[in-house]
Amino acid sequence: MSVQLPGKFAYGTMSMTWTPEPISHEQAFECLSHVIEKHGVNFIVGGEFYGPDDANMKMTEEFWKKYGDKYPDLIVSLKAGFNLEKFCPDGSQESVAKSIKQFASHFPKEKSKRPKLIFEVARVDPTISYDKTIGYISEFVKQGVIDGISISEVGAGSIQKAISVAPISAIEVEFHLLCEDILTNGVLAEAAKHDIPVIAYSPLCRGFLTEFAINDLDNFYKLSNRPGDVRANCDKFVGDNFWHNAKRVKALQEFAHKKGTTLESLSLSWIIAVGGQENFFGIPKLPKIMPITSGTSASKIDRNLGSPVQLTRADLEEINKINEAHPVKGYRYTKEAEALSFA
């Protein structure tokens, strides 16, 4: 049985806990309450490795203890199954069991007293057949420890292996106006066959698809290439690639302003509008696509979610022409990491 995902957006909590200066629980709780109450977002995405000492799930646990009665429809997804020390996926039975038990330990055992829990295996472990990994997770669904399974960074073949074993609630992959890979690499086509929702992470391309970035490119380039900044390890942000890709972003900003909206709003609205399209990039009917938004203040959340625009098919076609005129340069991460992309 899969978990049905409500609404148009998911909300990611990585920026709350996986940062040199994590925000306080009080500030995190304000953001979570705000995004649920004002924007109707009931799908919260966290990670086992989003901060030291299980910081992300501890924060979510405390939020549920304090506000769970107010938000009975909340769904919490945990991304896990990645060995940070070796920096590689770990889909072994031992890894999966340890992570799921730890995840479930933060919430009451009784289903009626906890949010719905989705376990998301992070990337595909090339040393283990993917159907075996999904089978290990499926046992915990059958036992009622968790409610559903999500998969991430998968290719079409891995999706096929996963659904051969258990129902899949969602597929999380990178998808935005600077990363359209899933439109042509078979991932969206396979998700569409089984009507599995796609969760689009990094929908603003780590800040590149924002007014802040495009209005001060020199500063944004410096910020993105600081030692320790994750973007410094993403080929799109490095050297000449950055300045080449900025031409597409600038053209998209101009289109957004013609539509009377911001670059952020256009970028998120585009993802939502692509979901459900018929006969798009050769796919008969696309599944629902939900951007994962974030924000550590109510004002930033509102800036991202407060002004969506309705995009017509003609708008999507015009955006596609912009993208074709400005092809993206650079790997999603690095050349060496490509083997783990859409595996």
Image (spheres, helix red, strand yellow):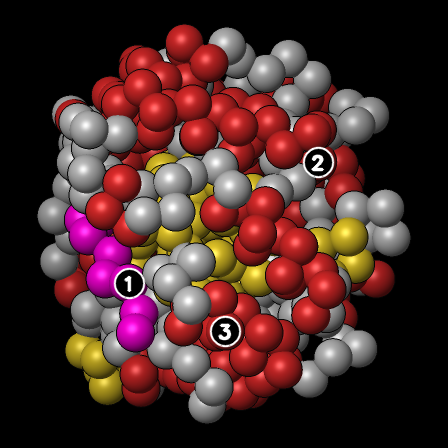
Mark closest to the chain's N terminus, 3 or 1: 1
Q: Could you tell which of marks 3 and 2 lies nearer the N-terminus? A: 3
> Looking at the picture, which amino acid does disc 1 mark?
Val
Q: CA distance from mark 3 to mark 2?
A: 35 Å
Which picture quadrant has residue 158?
A: bottom right
Pointer 1 residue: 3
From the top left corner, tell me how far across and down residue 85 is, in percent.
86, 46
Circle 3 residues within 10 Å: few <14, some 14–19, many ≥20: some
Residue that appears at 77% across and 52% down: 83
Residue 263: tell me if it is visible: no
The magenta segment: 1-10
Q: Residue at x 71, y 46 (%)?
A: 234
Mark sitting on residue 230: 2
Q: Nearer the viewer, residue 50 or 282?
A: 50
Whichever of labels 2 and 1 marks the residue nearer the N terminus, that label is: 1
Comparing labels 3 and 1, the label whose residue is closer to the camera? 3
Give yes or no for residue 7 being in the magenta stretch. Answer: yes
Q: From the viewer's perspective, is residue 16 above or below residue 25?
A: below
Q: What percent of the width, then of the height, locates residue 242?
A: 66, 40
**Amino acid residing under circle 2:** Val
Disc 2 versus disc 1: nearer the observer = 1
Q: Which residue is mark 3?
A: 139
Q: Residue at x 26, y 23 (%)?
A: 67
